[in-house]
Amino acid sequence: MSLRHLSILAEDDDDPMLSAINLVDVFLVLVVALLTAVVVQTQASGNDSVTIIRNAGQPDMEVVVREQGREVRFKGAGSAAQGQGVRAGVAYRLEDGNIVYIPEGGGVPGAVRSGAGGPAEPTP
């Protein structure tokens, strides 16, 4: 080998391919970070509470409630509920979609009314 070939190898060239390879490495690190974030988010959403209603309004209606990794199933008997009881209060649906519950008689002052999708507010 001649001395000229050794000096070429020792020089620090600004090869455009080297910078392209470095960009590929940076993008690979970003992709791995994004995939890790997606996996963590998926695992965190597994602890959410979910209510599923199957065959709504049918005699074989079923309600499935999933809370903190547990699943509870409620199955309908196919008929209306029967039994003794007393009227507990009245519920009204407002024009904006909120539902207001007003207890009768022995209601506690400052009871909570909750809306469909709205925050809970104390009743006057």
Image (cartoon, rainbow, N blue to C red):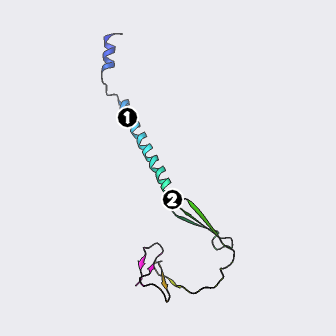
Binning the other alpha carbons within 10 Å of mark 2 as few (below 14), some (14 to 19) or many (20 upward) gives: few
At mark 2, the secondary structure is loop
As drawn, 6 above or below 95: above
Q: Earlier in the sequence, mark 1 or mark 2?
A: 1
- What is the three-letter code of the residue carrying label 1? Asn
Tell me if 55 is positioned left or right of 90 in this view.
right
How far across and how far down the image is residue 76, in percent?
66, 72
Tell me if 55 is positioned left or right of 96 in this view.
right
**Who's the residue at 31% across and 25% down the image?**
13
- What is the three-letter code of the residue carrying label 2? Asn
How far across and how far down the image is residue 46, in percent?
52, 57
Q: Is residue 123 magenta?
A: yes
Q: Is residue 97 magenta?
A: no
Give how far apart the Cα atoms at labels 1 and 2 are. 39 Å
The quarter of the image holding the C terminus is bottom left
At mark 1, the secondary structure is helix
How far across and how far down the image is residue 99, in percent?
48, 79
Look at mark 1 in the image and give the residue it sits on: 22
As drawn, 11 above or below 38: above
Seen from this angle, which residue lies furthest top?
A: 1
Q: Which mark is residue 85?
A: none
Q: Which mark is residue 47?
A: 2
Towards the viewer: 96 or 100? 100
Magenta residue span: 109-124
**Who's the residue at 56% across and 87% down the image?**
87
